[in-house]
Amino acid sequence: MIFQKHHSLTCSGVFVLFCVHNCFGTGIYFNDMNRYLEQAAKLFSPEVKSFIQNNPSVYEIRVRPEKKVFVVTEKGNFPCGPILSPDEFNHIFSVLNGGSLYKHEDTLPYGFFTDSFGGRCGVVCDIAGLSGEGRAVIKVNGLNLRVPRFIRGVSEPLCQDLSADKAVQGTLIYAAPCTGKTTVIRDIARYFSEFPYRMRVCVIDERREFDSRDYRADANIDILSGYSKKMGIEVAIRTLSAQLIICDEIGDFDDANGICQLANSGVPLIATAHAQTSEELFHKDAIRLMREKKIFTWYAHLAPHCQQGLCFDQMERL
């Protein structure tokens, strides 16, 4: 992999550009995403299977009954193969859920479950009891297989900047959906938990998108799978004495209030959020709350559709 880096001063902090060249085509995969695609491709018709196998940059596979399969790549959304019958859709769903809806009943009403290949599968469903605690799935209308990626080294230019002062600084990575935010923080967890840092890294994995098997035996990392941000941070600070906490997809005030426990704790947080621009990011009430509490030192924007691979085109220190 080739890293490029350029710095120039701006009035708001530092403008930074790093590029990781060809990370989707020739990156070093510690846990190759092709393993997931190979298994997923077997669920579909020869036409869909061929398309998946010939497009290594597949992000998602969207499945709906009585519709064509849509395959999402860095070049767009592509309808593939014949129309799926309801029986074919139900078979795919059964394989993905391991033949048991019961073991996924806690997450299905919230729109996802961990599929039998180890990825996160989004769910379009009709549910009852939306406003209460007793939510129940009535009917599943669609599936979105999100292809997990672990690209070793993809976060290194960013990590080198975040630790330039010998201490890791809290950072919020923001970008539009499907731009690689989760891929980056998977590798950040790897970077700081391995030699020479070997920090006590704790990942709050609310939606079960991290896998301990992706990390080497000497990585000093704990993954709290299925924990809310609030509960996970309490455990990370009080019982695991974490030196760095990582979490994905900060959303609402519940997340923000849980994260604000970190104020004055001395434990840095690296997290992600959905936003296409800094203006959109700071328009969100939850983000403004965390900004007031000075949870993050850096705000890093991951550029969409960068031809060189994964690119950070702006960093602001606030």
Image: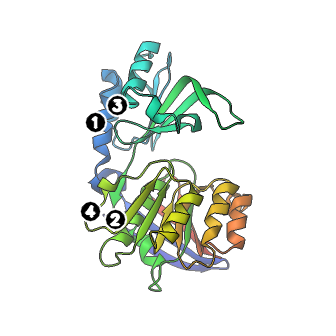
* Residue type beneath disc 4: Arg
Q: Which residue is mark 2?
A: 153
**Disc with the residue nearer the chain's start (3 vs 1):** 1
* Residue type beneath disc 1: Glu
**Disc with the residue nearer the chain's start (3 vs 2):** 3
Q: Quadrant of residue 230?
A: bottom right
* Label 3, label 2: how far apart the Cα atoms are: 28 Å
Q: Which residue is mark 4?
A: 216
* Residue type beneath disc 2: Gly
| Residue 16, percent from left and from top | 52, 73
* Label 4, label 2: how far apart the Cα atoms are: 14 Å
**163 vs 84: above or below:** below
* Residue type beneath disc 3: Phe
Marks 1/2 in contact by CB < 8 Å: the verdict is no
Furthest residue toward bottom: 165
**Disc with the residue nearer the chain's start (3 vs 4):** 3
